[in-house]
Image (cartoon, rainbow, N blue to C red):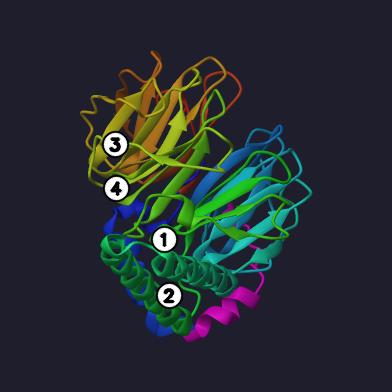
Amino acid sequence: MANRFICETLGSACLGVSMVLAAPAAFAVPDILETPARPTLLAPESLLNDATRAGERIVAVGERGHVIFSDDEGRTWVQGAVPVSLTLNAVDFGTEQHGWAVGHSGVVLHSSDGGENWTLQLDGNQASTLAIESKQSQIAELEEQIEQAEDDEKADLEWALDDLFFTLENMQADQDVGPVNPFLDVWFEDDSHGFVVGAYGMILRTQDGGENWEDWAPNLDNPQNFHLNSITQVTGGALVAVGEAGQIHVSVDGGDTWERRESPYEGSLFGVMGTGQVNEVLTFGLRGNTFRSTDLGRSWTVVPNEGGATINNGAVADDGRITLVGNGGAVLMSTNGGESFRVYFRNDREGVMAVVPLQGTDLLLVGEGGVKFTDSRGRNPN
């Protein structure tokens, strides 16, 4: 899992700010879409937004298209070959060799060699076209329903049709600006089946390893097109996606269908993860709000968090320890399945975007300061 957007270290407002700032400079997007990431020895010290394992290897992604990988638990790093120089927000591997990374301007990258080399599978222009075609199909289907509907049903259907036309017009206007909307997270089950999620309700599905993508937004109850920030699979097999305005969507059939759960929170949820126990879910986000469910989101309990810092990401170690990380150097650790956490703020106060448990009890953190090694509490080694 990852989370996704460079500005999450500054809070939820940054997504909108970034898009506003990006629009006037949209003319430059094709350049960085076609410019490979520059090799640099400073990549492990630069902003990194996500990290995950590809088998025993650790792979991290970040600004300027940086992808780095390590085969010795993070002691040394090699930079991967990436065809774009855009900020990458998230990375996930469906197998040891096949991985996907997503980022700004709607890019989806694929690696078939464990993160050493990457190819561009999709960009924001193509994603926009998919979404527009999907919306046009919805309009055509609804127009047919209206023709066959009883008179007392037509008024509501016509209102829904007006909403679809309004959304379509906005999509077409956005397409004229250029590919500025980011993908924020990615999840793959294997080397074929996966999802990417992002700004303004974007969610795409592939069943052939990214050769073809489908707009999956119509399958989620998100009429306001709120941002989707994170997607993951929890123990037991269910998929969970969360986002802006407290959205929580659950699928128990591999993503074919989704049910929106009643949310315990109306603010932005930046991350979601399992606890390692069947059907248990942790979700977290703005101002440190953290919630736990033992029944796939049908009910929730508030997890106390005295730190109050926005939480961006988390991971479960092999021994069951759960670590959450966030803004201001926040590192939260639980040994009771996420029922409670001990909070520690690192002295550097740099935002932490993701965490990878290492052998033993140590942690590898990535974020504003690049790669950091800590003990199980987030403290620097002595």
The residues colored magenta run 27-44
Residue reaching furthest to the front: 150
Q: CA distance from mark 2 to mark 4?
A: 23 Å
Mark in front: 1 vs 3: 3
Name the residue: 24% across, 34% down: 264
Instruction: Determine contact: label 3, label 4, CB under 8 Å.
Output: no
The local crowd at label 4, few if under 14, some if 14 to 19, many if 20 or more residues have their Cα within 10 Å, is many
Q: CA distance from mark 1 to mark 2?
A: 12 Å
The local crowd at label 2, few if under 14, some if 14 to 19, many if 20 or more residues have their Cα within 10 Å, is some
**Residue 216, image x, y percentages:** 53, 55
Q: CA distance from mark 1 to mark 3?
A: 21 Å
Nearer the N terminus, badge 4 or badge 1?
Answer: 1
**Residue 118, image x, y percentages:** 72, 59
Q: CA distance from mark 3 to mark 4?
A: 14 Å
Q: What residue is disc 2 on?
A: 171
Q: What residue is disc 4 on?
A: 268
**Residue 163, image x, y percentages:** 32, 69
